[in-house]
Image: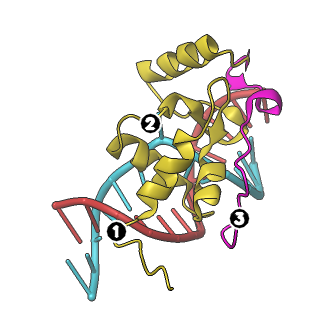
Chain colours: A yellow, B cyan, C red
Amino acid sequence: MKPKAVPKPPMAAAIAGKIRQIPRGQVSTYGAIAKAAGYPRCARHVSKVLNQVPGLPWQRVLGAGGRISLPGEYGFEQRFLLEAEGVRFKGRHVDLAKCEYHFPGARRKTA
DNA sequence: ACTGTGACACTGG
DNA sequence: ACCAGTGCCACAG
């Protein structure tokens, strides 16, 4: 059958789902999540989803290069929470080489 | 239907 | 290494 499905599966659900599967102690980037969700060009929407969908490990979402894009006090909060999970920080960036989480089958077709 | 929005990514200086 | 500007794309009102 044709899974026309997704009556309303905007990318919000796809992105939120990807973020939810990020294991503790690991992190990911907006671009990677957007790409894994099926929208390689919509890194910016990932940020919106984080604000719209509560219950997500927003702290595990970083900007390109492992940089914290979150401004204000929340930026420190994110870094604090990540370190609590075991994420190593290199100054203002995270060591993506060790903590970047790779999504399983990050392809937009077949699985 | 259109405009505004956004915790980005990337390039150049 | 850091700062600033530009481009992108889908969703909400």
**Front position in the image: A81 or C3:** A81
The magenta span reads A89-111
Residue pointed to by mark 3: A107
| Position in image of residue B11 (x %, y %) | 77, 58
Residue in the image at 65% along x and 39% along y: A28
Asked which secondary structure carries label 2, the reply is: loop
Question: Which residue type does callout 2 highlight?
Answer: Leu
Tell me the chain of label 3: A
| Position in image of residue A32 (x %, y %) | 66, 50
Q: Quadrant of the C terminus of chain A?
A: bottom right
Question: Which residue type does callout 1 highlight?
Answer: Lys
Residue in the image at 71% along x and 58% along y: A106
Asked which secondary structure carries label 3, the reply is: loop
Calculate the distance from the C-alpha at mark 1 to the C-alpha at mark 3. 21 Å
Find residue A8 and name its label. 1
Disc 1 packing (10 Å; few <14; some 14–19; many ≥20): few
| Residue A13 location, quadrant | bottom left
Q: Is residue A91 magenta?
A: yes
Calculate the distance from the C-alpha at mark 1 to the C-alpha at mark 2. 19 Å
Q: Tell me if A49 is positioned left or right of A81 in this view.
A: left
Q: Are marks 1 and 2 in contact (CB under 8 Å)?
A: no
Calculate the distance from the C-alpha at mark 3 to the C-alpha at mark 2. 22 Å
Residue pointed to by mark 2: A56
Residue in the image at 34% along x and 68% along y: A8
Secondary structure mostly seen in the magenta stretch? loop
Find residue A41 and name its label. none
